[in-house]
Image: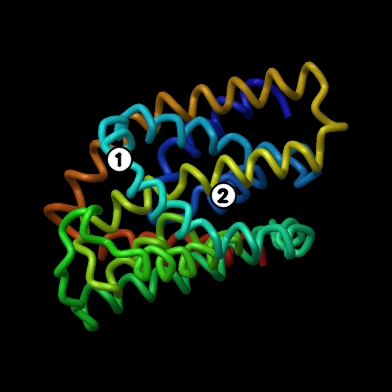
Amino acid sequence: MDLFHAIILGIIEGITEFLPISSTGHMILASKLMGLDQNNFLKTFEIAIQLGSILAVIALFYRKLTCGIDIWIKLMIGFIPTGLLGLTLYKLIKDLFDPFTVAYMLIFGGGVFLWIEYFYKPQHKIETIEKIDYKKAFFIGLFQSLAMIPGTSRSGSTIIGGLLLGLSRKCAAEFSFLLAIPTMFAATGYDLYKNAEILNTQNLQILLIGAFVAFLTALMVIKVFMRFISHFGYGFFGIYRIAMGAIFLLWIL
């Protein structure tokens, strides 16, 4: 893996992190297309690079994050399920980083989005994050924990959870973005700690460049995404997930 690969994967991460289409899944599939082996460093890169995208969330939602302690309590409550499961299932999760898992989960998640958008039609009663109670924050966190399976999509699973619990499309997306902050900081820190021996000077340079590219890309994508879902909803992403999963499944078989 070199700097060119880091830049390409950084762009993919920045574009896909907050779209409900699985950033990790797309990076795994892109890595396979570029002929990269899923070794320990690449697996760590695919997790740690997401920190760049999370810094973009902090930059864009700075005011909301500094308006009081209540939002942070909700984020920590939402983080609890993923944090506990991540610690206990760390090795199993890393073993799932393969294209087949990604393809199957892309298709499954796409079907769920289409079902919600066109058949279930949940009533969206909660328009702002301030109106999310602690119980709903915890249940959204349970949905987020499903995203430890590559291809599921962290943002996709939390948005689905939010929609099913009565959040509006915009509110579900915003809470998903913010919930990524404690989740990805913890996931990145723990993974870097577990793989500290492979972080030589060259690997750190590759990682930092990838994260910086992801940061710049995510800044632009988040704004466009929020405008898109306000007008069109999530049906498009369901179709995209199914099509992408099917294409890669046929390709890797």
The quarter holding residue 5 reads top right
Residue at 32% x, 36% y: name it.
Answer: 221
Q: Secondary structure at mark 1?
A: loop
The residue carrying mark 1 is 68
Residue at 48% x, 62% y: name it.
Answer: 144
Residue 3, position as x, y percentages in the image? 65, 20
The residue carrying mark 2 is 24
- How many labels sit on residues? 2
Residue 40, position as x, y percentages in the image? 80, 43
Looking at numbered disc 1 in the image, what kind of residue is underneath it?
Gly
> Which mark identifies residue 162?
none
Say if 7 sits above or below 70 in the image.
Answer: above
Quadrant where the C terminus is found in the figure: bottom right
Q: Secondary structure at mark 2?
A: helix
Residue at 56% x, 25% y: name it.
Answer: 7
Of tags 1 and 2, the one toward the viewer is 1
Crowding around mark 1 (Cα neighbors within 10 Å: few <14, some 14 to 19, many 20+) is: few
Drawn side of residue 64 relative to residue 45, left or right: left
Could one spot residue 243 in this view of the protein? Answer: yes
Crowding around mark 2 (Cα neighbors within 10 Å: few <14, some 14 to 19, many 20+) is: many
Looking at numbered disc 2 in the image, what kind of residue is underneath it?
Thr
Say if 169 sits above or below 213 in the image.
Answer: below
Single out the residue that lies furthest toward the bottom.
119
Calculate the distance from the C-alpha at mark 1 to the C-alpha at mark 2: 32 Å
In the foreground, 175 or 169: 175
